[in-house]
Amino acid sequence: MAIMEKFRVGMVGVGETGTPLLKQLLDAPFVEVVGVADLDLQLPGVRLAQEKGVAVTANFIEIAEQGERVDIIIDVTGSRKVREDLRRYMQFSGNTHTVIVHERVALLMMSLGAGQRVDTRHDEMTY
C-alpha cells in the first residue's frame, strides 16, 4: 500500500475568517499544518494551533522561509501588504515549489465545504 504524501500547509491569519479553515485543515488526515502566523498571538486560532503542536509566529515570513517544506501558504489576512510581501519573498528566494493561496480562493474552498457562500469577517486590513 502506498503511503499518501500529505499536503504541507502554512496559514497566515487565523482570526474569525481563518480559524474555521484551520480547524478543517487540522482535522484532515491528508494535511500537515506546518505553521500558523498572526499578529495577535492571543487569538483562539493561535491557541488551537499550539494545542495541536503546530509552530506559531507573529512573523508570516517565517512560514515562507521554510521553503519547499511548505506546499501551500493560505493567506487569509485580507491584507494587500501581506499578499505583496509574501509574493515578493517567494520571487527573491527562488522558491518555485510553494503556492500562495489568495483569501478569495480560501473562501471558495470553505464555501464548497459549507454548502453555502462563506464571506470574510474583515474589511481590507493594513499591517
Image (cartoon, rainbow, N blue to C red):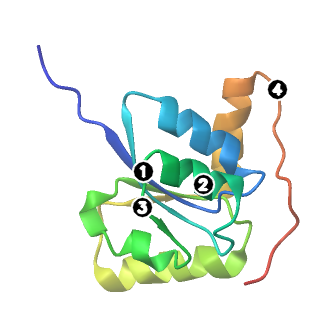
| Side (left or right) of 66 relative to 123 | left
Q: Label 4 vs label 2: CA separation?
A: 27 Å
Compare marks 2 and 3 and give the one earlier in the sequence.
2
Give the mark toward the camera: 2 or 1.
2
Q: Nearer the viewer, mark 4 or mark 1?
A: 1
**Mark 4 lies on residue:** 116
Secondary structure of the residue carrying tag 4 is: loop
| Residue pictured at 65% horizontal, 57% vertical | 14
- Mark 3, secondary structure of its residue: loop
Which residue is at a point 82% across and 52% down the rendered structure image? 120
Q: Amino acid at mark 1?
A: Val
What quarter of the picture does the C terminus occupy?
A: bottom right
- Give the spatial CA distance, label 3 vs label 4: 31 Å
Residue wearing tag 1: 9
The mark found on residue 55 in the picture is: 3
Marks 1 and 3, the one that precedes in the sequence: 1
Labels 3 and 4: the sequence-earlier one: 3
Q: Closer to the camera: disc 3 or disc 4?
A: 3
Mark before the other along the chain sequence, 4 or 1: 1
Q: Amino acid at mark 4?
A: Gln
| Residues at marks 1 and 3 touching, judged by CB atoms closer than 8 Å | no
Q: CA distance from mark 2 to mark 3?
A: 11 Å
